[in-house]
Image: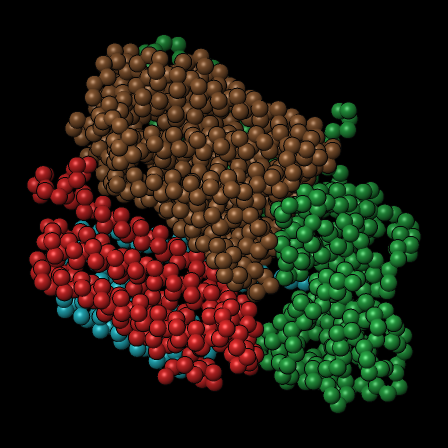
Amino acid sequence: MSERVTQPPTYYAVFAGLIALTVLTVGLSLVDLGEWHTVVGLGIAIAKALLVVLFFMHLLHSDTMTWIAAGTGLFWLGIMLVLTLSDYLTRWVLSY
Amino acid sequence: MSTITQYVPQAVPPPPSEPGENYLNAAFGLRSWLLTTDHKRIAILYLVTVTLMFFLGGAAATLIRLNLMTPYGELVNADTYNKLFTMHGVLMVWFFLVPVIPVVLGNFFLPMMIGARDLAFPRLNLASWYIFIFGAAFTLWAITVGGVDTGWTFYTPFSSKSSHTNVIPTLTGIVISGFSSIATGLNFVVTVHRMRAPGLTWGRLPLFIWSLYATSIILLLATPVLAMALSLVIIERVFQIGIFDPSLGGDPLLFQHLFWFYSHPAVYIMVLPGMGIVSELITCFARKHIFGYTFVAWASIGIAVLSFLVWAHHMFVAGQAVYSAMIFSILSYAVAVPSAIKVFNWTATLYRGSVSYRAPLLFALGFIGLFTMGGMTGLFLAALGMDMHVHDTYFIIAHFHFIMVGGTVMAYMGGLHYWWPKMTGRMYPEGWSKLAALIIFVGFILTFLPQFVLGYLGMPRRYHTYPPEFQVLNVMSSAGASILAVGYLLPLVYLIWSLGYGEPAGPNPWGATGLEWQTPSPPPTDNFVATPIVTYGPYEYSPLEETELVG
Amino acid sequence: MVAEVPLFPEQASTIAGRVDGLLYFLVAVTGSVTLLVTVLILYFAVKYRRRSDGDRTPRILGSFRLELFWTVTPLFFFLVMFYWGASIYNDVSRPPDGAPEVYVVGKQWMWKIQHPDGQREINELHLPVGRPVKLILTSEDVIHDFFVPAFRTKVDVIPGRYVTTWFHPTRVGTYHLFCSQYCGTNHAGMVGSVVVMGEQDYDDWLAGTRAEGSLALQGRKLFLKLQCDTCHSPGPHQRAPLLENLYGSTVHLEDGGTVTADDAYIRESILYPEAKVVQGWRPIMPTFKGQLADKGSELTEEEALIQLAAFIRTLEPGQTPVRTESFPAPVGAPTRPKGKEPASVVVPERPPGREEPP
Amino acid sequence: MSAEHPLLAHHFDDIEQQRGAETLGMWVFLATEVLIFGGLFTGYFVYRSWYPRDFEAVSARLNVLIGAVNTVVLLTSSLTMALSVYAVRTGRQRMLLHGLTLTAVLGTAFLVLKAVEYYADYRDGLVPNTAPFDAPEHQREWAEAQVSPQKVILFLMFYYVMTGLHAVHLTVGIGLMAWLIVRARGGTLSPERYVPVEVCGLYWHFVDVVWIFLLPLLYLTGTHHPADFTHFL
């Protein structure tokens, strides 16, 4: 377990970043970006998630085993999404 | 490899010490069993529960085979038959095959084989048994008050719209038992990572531990998706909203995707621990180091990862996209390679060994034979052109029974017979156990080989009646099933008999090299007086100077 | 008695021969490897049996080259198996153009089959030998599966969607038809037979079977009965796009997308009109979901949709049926012989949002 | 580290091994939680790829104001949780107690706001199979937006199941906070025994991360339709 104890100023900075990103994402959603809405929305969400996971959950200075555990969950989610959507997105390509 | 201090296998195992204080006589009374956190006692609790579930599922199977003796389904009517094969599927998959080897032999021997006193979270281990019992109670209650007729696959829209049997309690029971699997998987992963004895590096772990670790990865990452898929079916039945209902905009195939995302890795949950046991049995009874340790170990991890990429080969004819079917077909062939590696390595291990025909080895050799045939027919199903013909026929039934019954159950029997002396301190009768192994093997071949032929002839699965010309093959299969039933009842008799009358077994009746054999039989509550220091690999049966690196 | 025990299904379609070829290859490869493993195990077990407890065995840790060999070789064979299987699957998923289309509706525990010329059969499918036929299947309630072992193909029949498969029968005979996706109580009873007949016998059968008008004609009667022509016909009161020459054309939608007008599009627009609104028209069409079935002539919703689609498919410019009286024509009464040009109909120029069919 | 540590459970060799086990255990558990929500996200993305317009039209009707406020509430609770972890590791008992109580209060505030939002949804006819939903003016709204009611119900199902499952997880989190507060008041949480706070913190932050993804997927999908986006204020 990490011996380093994260100091409050880091937490406040991260918190400010999170609030800023939230305001950004809600604001951007009002502007008509057309196709780009999903990408922008998820991109900001991933950024916020990274902030929380790295700093609030102390992943930044955890040992590699914790990194692997965190990464596995996401990787498997990726497998499910990519392969399931591979069926749905190509289902009507060959329809007769 | 590691610096090896010489371990000379004792020619004759030391005389059995008188049974001192051990985990069985450490405490008495119901409370000591129902509130225990000792991984060995929890394993015994699971052993009793899982064996009960096995014989309940087996009873359903017997009725099914009896009904199929005649083409007109004269034993039971269509509804009862549908409920029977659903009960057989649900009980065997979720309450016997998925849990059996991890929770019985894994719970008992994982800590001992890595030199730990107990699992990482003992209380969670007991909680997992209670969750399992709670889930089983739900399912058995649903079956007794009227059963469920959706098949163990619960395909929508039949399970969500048109089935009027108690689907919801059965699904709840299965979701609850899913959490028990997650708890066991969590316990094993953390234990293997954090609680190995000093000196026990990953390269020295016994292969049974490698396979349990790989199984736990699948248990952890697949079961949550099953819990979600089945909960969505419950939600759809309760609130009548069309998640998978096409008339409300849903897609039945989405349920199949989510269900098989769990259910294909689940078949590897069932067979991987069996492979781990066979690696232990082959090395011990051939008295020889495993051939290609690294390849066999990493084949388990390879299976665990690749098993998540192949699930849609269950849906080739279900109306998925042609291109995605081809992707899954080629990935399904990739997942077959690690299994092939394992089989070839086991065969190579026997080369120039010193093979003793004890009961556990007969089960292990039976496993290799039947698992190889099961795996090979899997290659038939991965080929798109062939699966188109044999999908949902008896070819599929024969394929997965070859792997589940011929593989997992055979390996479980082998593991049980191998570690029974250590668990109970008693030896079982040698003659009877060899006879049981033979009967099970013969009964199995007679039951499931005809089903390959029936499958290719096109007899669909889950049929209460069938065209008369298939009758001879079905009668042959039913005859084989009765022999198989006898084969499974025999161990129940002589193993229980051995508890009372078996002659006491010493700490190491087979002369094996595992850490678990360096404790008295039955082992004390804390397994080891002092945590052992490991200085050599798992299968050091031959003296150092005889090392030959083939090629 | 033993002679009657079939051990191998008949080959009755072009695909059957190829699937059996793949079977022989698979059996040969896997059989030989399984035999090799079994013989090796038995040989090693006997040759190196334990003679005394003190036997000394060599400490063989493994060999990289051997492992590489039995990783790469299986992979090679697997790729061959994959390619062979995928090529068969590829051909089965592409029906030949111009093959006559037979509509199949799976309904809990029976198959209702409709030929384009109007013949309707239950659990029976008559096919001419030597001529490919394309099947368009859908289901009324749960997932079924149209499986003919002699043709070696099956396809899951999913409610709410059209799936297609095709056969090219090569041998005359009567073959089993099974439902091979569990669908409830009488799943085992949902069987039937596919009768492959010679050319002449098939034509006699076609002529002999009573058919009250072709699929398209029944669709036309339904078109009038449901009063679709009040909006979908030319003239001052036209409030919906004309359906003439629609089938196969590319339709421009209100939200800018385009879609090819096939069976699925017609079916969806009847059941969920607001899903794909044609450019330039307002979404005022009510849904006809639940109103198509007619208990009297046991016409189910899916069959009605099939008949309407078949009728719309045959609509040439200017052929939208004109109502000759104010009250709807009774079912079965011919309102106007097909093909004769009514004097009063003026062929409108092309309405917005439609291109010539490809 | 002294081998015999007062908190050492009998089956661990040393306290370092025990702490490593507990945090790894929570991280692995969170991986399974990712996959439980993953099943729902897969279903959501599949249907969104099929019915993009319907999903956007319904999402525009959701109350984005409460959604955004709830996000801020949850982020603040994550901050107070992180500060509590800092407090316990540096032995600041009062700050620990305040931090934990604040986290629990903020969590409850989130649930209260959620209940208010659900009631508002009910009134706006966004709860399938209820009277307001079937009210003629709402049905006309859907017809005008060229959205078929079935697809509306499909999106709403995902909305309720995802936020509902999240709320259940949050309730469990609040329960954990209460348990921690009791232990903190009992004085059993110290720089030596900080792991329970760390582990509950990991769980709390995970629940926050799930909400971070729910916001753009459920609330912000349709807000760019000025025409029918009436719900912001």
Residue B1 drawn above or below residue C41:
below
Q: Residue at x 42, y 48 (%)?
A: B175
Quarter placement of the C terminus of chain D: bottom left
B231 lies left or right of C242: left
Chain in green colour: C
Instruction: Tell which residue pokes out farthest to the top in this image.
Output: C52
Q: What is chain A's hue in the picture? A: cyan
B11 lies left or right of D160: left
Chain in brown colour: B
C111 and B538: which is toward the camera? C111
Q: Residue at x 75, y 90 (%)?
A: C236
Residue C45 drawn above or below residue B298:
above
For the rendered model, the colour scheme is by chain
Q: What is chain D's hue in the picture? A: red
Give how far across and how far down residue D94 sits, in percent: 9, 62
Q: Name which quarter of the figure residue B495 lies in.
A: top left
D140 and A60: which is toward the camera? D140
Quarter placement of the N terminus of chain D: top left
Q: Name which quarter of the figure residue C64 lies in.
A: top left
